[in-house]
Image (cartoon, rainbow, N blue to C red):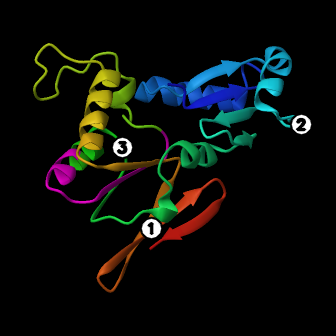
Amino acid sequence: MELIHIVGDELSRVQMRSASCSIATESPTGSTTPRPRWQSDSSEEHGVELKTLPAVFLLDGSVLADPTDAQIMDAIGENLHELSCDVAVVGGGPAGLTSAVYAGSEGLRTLVIERHVIGGQAGASSLIRNYLGFPRGISGAELTQRAYQQAWLFGAKFVFAREVTRLRANGVKKILTYRTDARSRQRR
């Protein structure tokens, strides 16, 4: 199943980011179509005339024109504005994913907030030999994918393209302040 269909020049900003996200998470983000083919095929198929490329066609039929990372992630994933949690994990590297697995397995509502893609530096490693349970080693991408799937199966929610800039207490509640693009927003 294709989650998104990207239309634009092959080296467009959105396609490059989407490809790196797809590689890091091995998720089916969808296909890309260079502009000339899209103009002849997809415009009639989707009934849309776009003046701004790249464009991202979503599964629900909506279209994003020249979207930011945050807009794409909100469209295909969790939206930070709609989530509350028992445990917020800042960072989706091996330690963050492990925390999400443990918290989720205990039945806690878990939210992982990652500013780029899951896996961190380890996700790009061709072979990790010092991780518990893999005496012959495992690729960073495979380790990341396994941890992500396990955390997701335990109910963890993931939000990408958000950078947490502050944590403060408001009574018993904790409030995360995060940045998306050039703006800063708060999550209560």
Horizontal and vertical percent for residue 96?
29, 46
Residue assigned mark 2: 51
Residue 4 placed where, x, y %?
A: 60, 31
In the depicted structure, whether residue 20 falls above or below residue 164: above
Residue type marked 1: Arg
State the residue position of label 3.
92
187 vs 103, left or right, is right
- Mark 2 near mark 1, Cβ–Cβ under 8 Å? no
Residue 139 sits in which quadrant? top left
- Tell me the crowding category of disc 1: few under 14, some 14 to 19, or many 20 or more residues within 10 angstroms, Cα based: few
Where are the magenta residues, as a range? 101-116
Choose between 20 and 146: the one closer to the eye: 146
Up-down: is 126 above or below 179? above
Tag on residue 137? none
Q: Which residue is mark 1?
A: 166
What amino acid is found at the position of numbered circle 2 in the picture?
A: Lys
Mark 2 Cα shell of 10 Å, populated few (<14), some (14-19), many (≥20): few
What type is the residue that disc 3 sits on? Gly
Residue 104 in percent (x, y) is at 21, 51
Graded by Cα atoms within 10 Å as few (under 14), some (14 to 19) or many (20 or more), the crowding at tag 3 reads many
> The residue tagged with tag 2: helix, strand or loop?
loop
